Amino acid sequence: MGSHTTIRVSSLALAWLIMLAALAQAEPASVTMRGETRAVWPADDLRSRGFDVADIPRDENAAWVYIEAINAYSELPRELGGIFDHVLDAGWPKHPQAKALAKWLDQPENKKALELARRAAEFEHCQIPYYGNPRGSVVNMLLPSLSHHRILAKMLVVNGKRREAGGKYDEALEDYLVAARMGSHVAQGITLIEALVGVACDALAAQAIHDLVLRRNLPQDRLERLLNETSQMLEHAPDMQRGLVQEQAFGLGMVDEFASQPSHFITNPAALSTLSFLDSVNVPTDSGWGALEARLGKLVFPDRAIKQNMRRYYTEVQRRTALPASEAGWNDNWEEEMISNLPAWDMISRTMLPSLSRANVLAQRLITQMRMTRVSIALRLYALTNQGGPPEDLEYLKRWLGGPDDLIDPFSGDYFVYRRTEKGWLLYSFSDNLTDDGGIEGNRPFDKDHVIRFPPPKQKAFED
């Protein structure tokens, strides 16, 4: 009797342990971020709507550690905003305000936040939680963590610039690479905006790595390791194709919402132009008047024709996304023409289909930056092994650059333009206008040619 009782108690304890483990892994019903609590949109509901939400155990999901980091950092004082931005763009200056910025970075909250970000970056997978009411429109889904991810990436780069100024190059590079891994993590999400935030984080990291490589004399073994690390950055760069597939799922999902509750816009067609009626959409229940309206909506609403129009548009965007930027025609007006040629009655597609050229151009800019950074690393390696001089052409770099596309400018489809100069070398991309402007830069990045010079220009001084 005693032994049977023991077995029953042990089984009960095991059941409790299993239940506690399941609760630990379960998606929380709400999350508090920077003092504001929001309801989590159930992942199962999003999957049922066609979204590729990854099912990652909580203890293997970097997103929850990033949320800890987001909750940890302290706000940047307004008076330090100028020097913070200067460090991002130029470098750590010799200026009295730099001491105040260093003191802010060294606050326990910020040191904790950066350490948590570094820990999260070591995870393989990341699926950020989404917030909102699943009985409302999917267009109202919230992604409040994205702005904080960008802040953390900037903090990592600023901290890396401080380390770099102190001669701690390995530690600086690690902070830059963490910012890049954060970008790759964020871009694993289901929305195009996540991919774009990932692009922004990666671009910050690529620029910082590029500046360090040009301005500091790294040893050969460190440069060789950096080539491998930047190869990983390229391999895990945000994937616009994935973002577009998920963007299409949003569009098709909203058509289903319209079909299920047509009264929200049939009774107020003017609201369609602003999509304001979506604020009051409630997904109908499986019974009662809601189900009846959904049934009638499917009968009278041309949802199949609208979805066909949307799919045709997204198919064309995805086809062009698969092409090199030099062939994709992102600067043409084909998107506007496709939308304007839609039937006049299809106001839903006309209103909701977004212009996606800008997103793809930004992604191609990132690839350009990463490739040019890798070419710069290889040029520095060549100089270390050839009495300090640059090569005659880029072919000499192939011993370090193993990928077939490493030397290719996405905006020209050919090798980056390279030439030796009196004191070093010049490297540039045709950039957005797909035109060789002779190495002339525009007023804004990528307006004309995107240029790298060695030796680099003197860093701008910080002015209050």
Image (cartoon, rainbow, N blue to C red):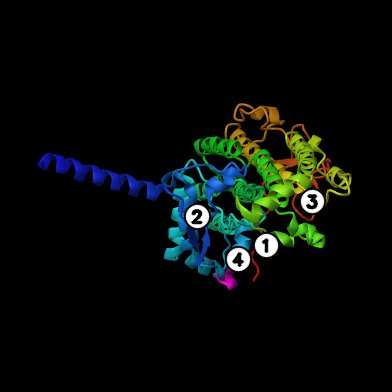
Residue range highlighted in magenta: 77-81
Q: Secondary structure at mark 1?
A: helix
First in residue order: circle 3 vs circle 2 = 2
Q: Nearer the viewer, residue 402 or 251?
A: 251
Q: Nearer the viewer, residue 276 or 188?
A: 276
Q: What kind of residue is marked 2?
A: Arg
Instruction: Give the side of residue 141 with respect to residue 334, left or right.
Output: left
- The percent position of residue 132, horizontal first and vertical second, equals 58, 58
Q: CA distance from mark 4 to mark 1?
A: 44 Å
Q: CA distance from mark 3 to mark 2?
A: 52 Å
- The percent position of residue 377, horizontal first and vertical second, equals 61, 38
Q: Secondary structure at mark 4?
A: helix
Q: Residues within 10 Å of mark 1 (few under 14, many from 20)?
A: few
The answer to whether residue 266 is magenta is no
- The percent position of residue 164, horizontal first and vertical second, equals 52, 53
Q: What kind of residue is marked 1?
A: Ser
Q: Assign the magenta stretch its main secondary structure.
A: helix
Q: What kind of residue is marked 4?
A: Ile
First in residue order: circle 3 vs circle 4 = 4
- The percent position of residue 455, horizontal first and vertical second, equals 67, 46
Mark drawn on residue 280: 1
Q: Secondary structure at mark 3?
A: helix
Q: Tell me the residue at 15%/40% (across/down).
A: 4
